[in-house]
Amino acid sequence: MLSRILVSTLFVALSTSMAADWPLHRGNATQTGVSDEKLPDKLEYKWEFKTKNGVEGTVVISDGVVYVGSADKHLYALDLKSGQLKWKTQLGIITASPGVNGDRVYVGDADGKFYCLNKATGAVIWTFETEGQISAAPNFDGDNVLIPAHDSTLYCLNKEGKKIWDFKIEGPIYGGVAVAKGATFLAGCDSMLHVLDVKTGKSLGSVDLKGQSGSAAAVFGDHLYVGTMSNQVLAINLKTLKIEWEFEAPRRKQPFYASAAVNEDLVVIGCRDDKVWGIDRKTGKRKWDFLTDHKVDGSAVIVGQRIFVGSFDQKFYVLNLKGEKIAEYSLDGAIMGSPAVSGGCVVIGTDKGTVYCLGAK
């Protein structure tokens, strides 16, 4: 049954990565962090927008509008071209990334409340209350929304905000879930990967990850890639539900909190050892590593022949696929989230509450 569910995974991954928008934390439902957007050869500072507290999550972009949550208790909608404020809505302390689906935008807050808002106006349509903080981005299956929470529960709600099912694990869920046609993939603090039927929430199988995970797993073809807090990146064969390879960063044993960006050849992932690692997708062998001046919790994004990633060292880096630095940009604070790519622009936030847009002036 599981193999049938995964037949179309590669098609989903490729088709969603080509969308002009960036409506989800990792750009697409399979969480690969890859875009076919055309970016200028040289990025320049285009605009910046200041919120009143930190921006920890990834911004999302839909129909030329940037949606960003801040710890100042507001969700903002900004014009992608100009950075001008379109609306803001007071909710709660937001450290999670929002998500856009259709004409609605969704986000959770530190009090465990999950909000559905009108994308055009910012008006709250409904609210759903969990019993723990929400630090993860939502994902979607059609009109249904998936919400991981710190109360050890993955919730599935319908468009009206009514619970369809929930799935409980042992320990909080910090990262988002991947969705491939018919299944969702949950890695949490119980050190397990759970494969669930996305319609019913029933388990289709599980894999022991040998360590807790605080990030969203990425699905590419019939494989899944995820980092753990025990200094490993794992490749899991989804047909057999077996670990195919394990990569462990040498020397400094530090956790991987970032999600992986995955293309045909590479798994690119940041680590708390201050490095961005390039791993051969098929073999799990190190291809390269790039050293920053601080830990890398934000997830990298691959756009064409370039990699975009931020660090706690307050720098935003552009690398080629060999891990060589092409450019770096100094921002005003630590970069905890991941970049979003749309409309010829890259948008990223900092812990000082500033949202930067880089593109062609």
Image (cartoon, grey):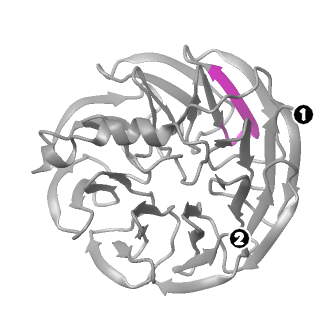
Residue 330 in the image: state x and y as whole percent: 83, 35
Residue 118 found in image quarter: bottom right
Residue 336 in the image: state x and y as whole percent: 64, 49
Query: Is residue 250 one of those drawn in magenta?
Result: no
Mark 2 or mark 1: name the one nearer the start of the chain.
Answer: 2
Q: Assign a secondary structure to mark 2.
A: loop
* Residue depicted at x 52% and y 37%: 18
- Residue type at tag 1: Lys
Which span of residues is magenta-colored? 310-319
Q: Which residue is mark 1?
A: 361
* Residue depicted at x 21% and y 40%: 7
Q: Which residue is mark 2?
A: 120
- Mark 2 and 1 residues: CB-CB less than 8 Å, in contact? no
Residue 13 in sight from this viewpoint: yes
Query: Is residue 317 one of those drawn in magenta?
Result: yes
Q: Is residue 20 above or below residue 125?
A: above
The C terminus, quarter of image? top right
* Residue depicted at x 29% and y 19%: 283
Classified by dominant secondary structure, the portion drawn in magenta counts as strand
Q: Is residue 116 above or below residue 43?
A: below
Q: In the depicted view, which residue is nearer to us: 299 or 6?
A: 6
